[in-house]
Amino acid sequence: MKFIVSSSYLLKQLQVLGGVINNSNTLPILDNFLFELNQNQLTVSASDLETTMSAVLEVDSESEGSIAVPAKLLLDTLKTFPEQPLTFVVENNNTIEISSNHGKYALAYADGAEFPNSVELADASSTTILGDILSTAISKTIFASGNDDLRPVMSGVFFQFSPENLTFVATDAHKLVKYQRHDVTASQVAEFIMPKKPLNLLKGILAGSESDVTIDYNESNAKFTFDNIELVCRLIDGKYPNYEAVIPKENPNKLTIDRSQFFGSVRRVSIFSNKTTHQIRLKIAGAELNISAEDVDYSNKAEERLTCDYQGDDMEIGFNSRFLNEMLNNLTSDSVSLEMSLPNRAGILTPIDGLDEGEHVTMLVMPVMLNN
């Protein structure tokens, strides 16, 4: 087995795949990349059993074979090379030898047959979506998903496909984000919960991508195919909570404000809030918004006044500033609206501008009880 490949091209592809490999694996074989050579096509795969990602690379070769190569050792070596062709030759003494312009490097390899097989999706449905849209949908929602091992369904992002639109939802019970695209649709209704790790990988690879991504999915797995890459992952098993039920429908009190100004104030004032509750208080009367926080234990307090556009009754509501900060930071619009009904009901944060045609973002933040 022998092939020649450009060092920077190989490194770029392996760095993408390397994101799948865990720092500590139960099976030693998972510390390797699987190299499967078929003439001038080299398929490289990485897996953690839950997620498997593979890329097809063009190489110069006439041979075939399959071996597992130590991932960290290979990546560390490739990072040091300037751009040049590298020749990989499998020797008889169970090592693979890499020849560069200046030297030779031998790595012990394992048998490719030991590597876990990728899952084949039976009876899969399929949807196609633009890479950049999928990346945006992930980054707009994933920050709101939970980390609670006792509620695994909330630790991922809920994908809801229908012939009308695609919906992506994430929640940790304190905050919720619903991201909708009406300009992209699926042929039939389907829903599944994607775990965080493969989503973070996709988000990074697909940012700004003009490629189409084909998503195949069945009851237990999903497969994302684009360019020369294929990612297969196991879905989170379980039923997603009925998120529509927690979004208040009647919200007569509506605050409209400049996002960056609001974000700046909340960020500053929250520094003075209690370190365990992170509570900040919003007091709205007329066209004035008063944002305050107090940490009684340390006699720290802060207060800021902003002008805003407000329709509704005067009101006072408390929020956890961490959640409010995360949401405002995740939006890109110039102005946002915060709709509220009562101080003990969730507030709905939506961007007013800066959205694409057919794009909808709804963010929900649960209030905290104010202690007067």
Image (cartoon, grey):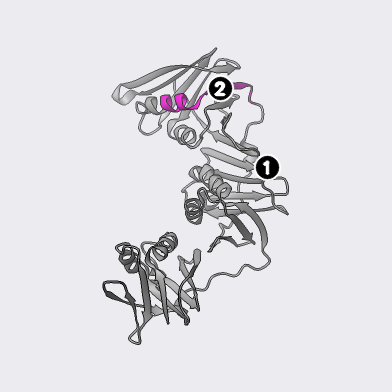
Relative image position of residue 129 (x, y in whole percent): 62, 52
**With respect to residue 343, does 240 lie above or below?**
below
Kindly indicate the quadrant of the structure image that contains residue 312.
top right
**Magenta stretch, residue numbers:** 251-266
How many residues crowd around disc 1 within 10 Å: few (fewer than 14), some, or many (20 or more)? some
How many residues crowd around disc 2 within 10 Å: few (fewer than 14), some, or many (20 or more)? many
**With respect to residue 329, does 10 lie above or below?**
below
Q: In this view of the protein, can residue 93 be seen by the observer?
A: yes
Question: Residues at badges 1 and 2 in contact (C-beta under 8 Å)?
Answer: no
Relative image position of residue 60 (x, y in whole percent): 45, 75
Of residue 292 and residue 288, the one placed in the foreground of this image is 288
Relative image position of residue 128 (x, y in whole percent): 64, 55
- Disc number at residue 278? none
For badge 1, the amino acid type reads His
**With respect to residue 206, does 10 lie above or below?**
below
Q: Secondary structure at mark 1?
A: loop
Q: Residue at x 58, y 24 (%)?
A: 342
Farthest residue to the bottom: give it.
92
Question: Does 63 sit left or right of 84 as displayed?
Answer: right
Whether 262 is among the magenta residues is yes
Q: Which residue is mark 1?
A: 182
- Disc number at residue 256? 2
Question: Does 245 sit left or right of 255 as displayed?
Answer: right
Q: Residue at x 50, y 42 (%)?
A: 144
Q: Secondary structure at mark 2?
A: strand
